[in-house]
Image (cartoon, rainbow, N blue to C red):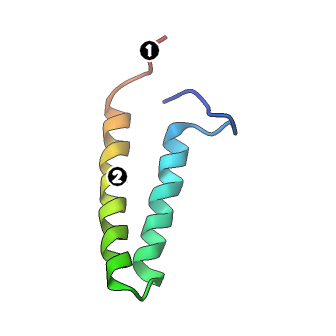
């Protein structure tokens, strides 16, 4: 989907990792503010991933 970054990971892989981390925070945090913001972050990252996947191949 995108060019690998410095560590050889694609943008999509990095966003997936960020989304999984936010998902974990939803369940492990005891702070309601942290849980609420983790939900918001996970939803935003999911929308970003969907847009990235729907955008087609990167320009040559």
How would you rate the neighbour count of disc 2 (Cα within 10 Å): few for under 14, some for 14-19, many for 20 or more? some
Which residue is most to the bottom?
Answer: 30
Q: Residue at x 48, y 73 (%)?
A: 24
| 17 over 12 or under it: above or below | below
Q: Quadrant of residue 25?
A: bottom left
Residue, x 44% and y 66% (percent of image)?
22
Where is 58 relative to 15, above or below? above
Q: Secondary structure at mark 2?
A: helix
Q: Position of residue 49 (x, y in %)?
A: 38, 44
Q: Is residue 45 left or right of residue 14?
A: left
Spatial CA span between label 2 and label 1: 22 Å
**Dot placed on the residue nearer the N-terminal end, 2 or 1:** 2
In the current view of this chain or complex, which residue is farthest to the right?
7
Q: Is residue 41 left or right of residue 1?
A: left
User: Where is residue 9 drawn, in percent x and y?
Assistant: 63, 40
Q: Residues within 10 Å of mark 1 (few under 14, many from 20)?
A: few
Q: Which residue was labeled with disc 2?
A: 46
Q: Residue furthest top?
A: 60
Residue 41 numbered mark, or none: none
Please report contact status of discs 2 and 1: CB closer than 8 Å, yes or no: no
In the image shown, does 6 or 13 lie closer to the viewer?
A: 6
Q: x, y (%) of residue 46?
A: 34, 52
Q: For the residue labelled by badge 1, is the local secondary structure a helix, a strand or a loop?
A: loop
- Residue 38 vs 54, above or below: the answer is below
Q: Which residue is mark 1?
A: 59
Can you give x and y, in whole percent of width and height, for residue 52 in the image? 37, 35
Q: How many numbered callouts?
A: 2
* Picture residue at 30% right of the left edge, 74% below the top: 36
User: Residue at point 54% right, 47% down?
Assistant: 14
Say if 43 sits above or below 5 in the image.
Answer: below
């Amino acid at each position: 989907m995108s060019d690998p970054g410095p560590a050889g990971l694609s943008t999509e892989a990095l966003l997936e990792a960020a989304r999984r981390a936010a998902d974990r925070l939803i369940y492990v945090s005891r702070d309601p503010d942290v849980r609420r913001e983790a939900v918001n972050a996970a939803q935003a990252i999911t929308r970003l991933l969907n847009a990235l996947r729907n955008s087609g191949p990167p320009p040559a």
